[in-house]
Image (tube, helix red, strand yellow):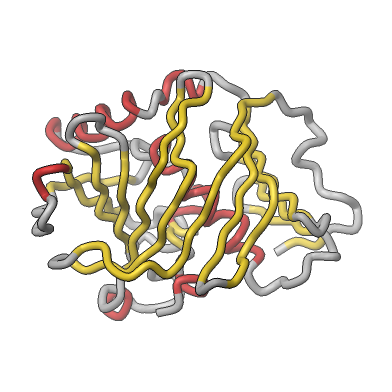
Amino acid sequence: MNLLKQTSLSVFALSFAFMGCKSPEKEASFVTKAEKAHQKEIFKNQDALQFDIKIEFGGQERMDGTMTLLTNSSKGLIELKDGSKIIYDKDKVFYSPNLPSEKSVRFDAYTWAYFFMFPYKMSDGGTIWTPYDNKGTNKDLFETQKLTFESGTGDAPDDWYVVYSNKETHLIEKLAYIVTIKTKKEDAEKQPHGIQYKKFETVDGVPFATEWQFCSWNEKDEFGETIGNASLSNIKFITVTADTFTPGKDFKTI
């Protein structure tokens, strides 16, 4: 499975089909502790945030630009270094005519934002949290739960995530996942992937991972070969205007 082609991650439950935790008390506490560690209350009381992001896979640049997101995740803007733009507004995606490649527009619009916003979407509607038997060698370092989705949630409700929370800090430090938007669940489960969140920095009281490491994953050995990296910088909360997410008249839509 090619991560860049397959990681639509529940545009994956996405299109940001903004999900409400329906979990037993034990599972809810896992979510609650993580949300508290990531300072969700402070985060959601802000209007929007902005950061520079560089992504590479296999030594090749995948993205280099600036991302602006509403903290409620309903709208986002990616401004690439070449001047092209991608905007999402709930389930609609717009992009400027000078975008170098159109084939991954919807993927780019939602995927990277979802990875960034994950700690603040754990109790969205349609999420189902269950215990997970972590078989990894470092299992004593993490609390681990599995996230699945109710039928009809987003574009790919068969997606799942294994979520690793640091036992001491309760920060989400790792995710494993499958993507079923373009393949059957049983096929996707043959080659899951993982992401590791590293180098947390605090901005106005909220911790953010400034380095992401993409890798292979399996239940026994967990996180394996590195296949990509992302670096984030200049993270800041901002106030946006009505024009921030307004597409130009010549923008295309998908």
- Where residue 194 sits, quadrant-wise, is bottom left
Relative vertical location of residue 70 with respect to residue 18 in this rendering, above or below: above
- Where residue 193 sits, quadrant-wise, is bottom left
Describe residue 23's horizontal placement relative to residue 85 as left or right: left
Q: In which quarter of the image is the N terminus?
A: bottom left
Q: Position of residue 117 (x, y in %)?
A: 47, 41
Relative vertical location of residue 68 with respect to residue 159 in this rendering, above or below: above
Query: Which residue is pictured at 30% across the width and 76% down the height?
Result: 191
Nearest the eye: 218 or 181: 218
Q: Quadrant of the C terminus?
A: bottom right
Q: Position of residue 234 (x, y in %)?
A: 63, 36
- Where residue 165 sits, quadrant-wise, is top left
Describe residue 154's horizontal placement relative to residue 177 as left or right: right
Q: Where is residue 63 in the image (x, y as percent from the top left)?
A: 64, 60
Query: Which residue is pictured at 36% across the width and 65% down the height?
Result: 215
Describe residue 212's horizontal placement relative to residue 223 as left or right: right
Nearest the eye: 157 or 135: 135
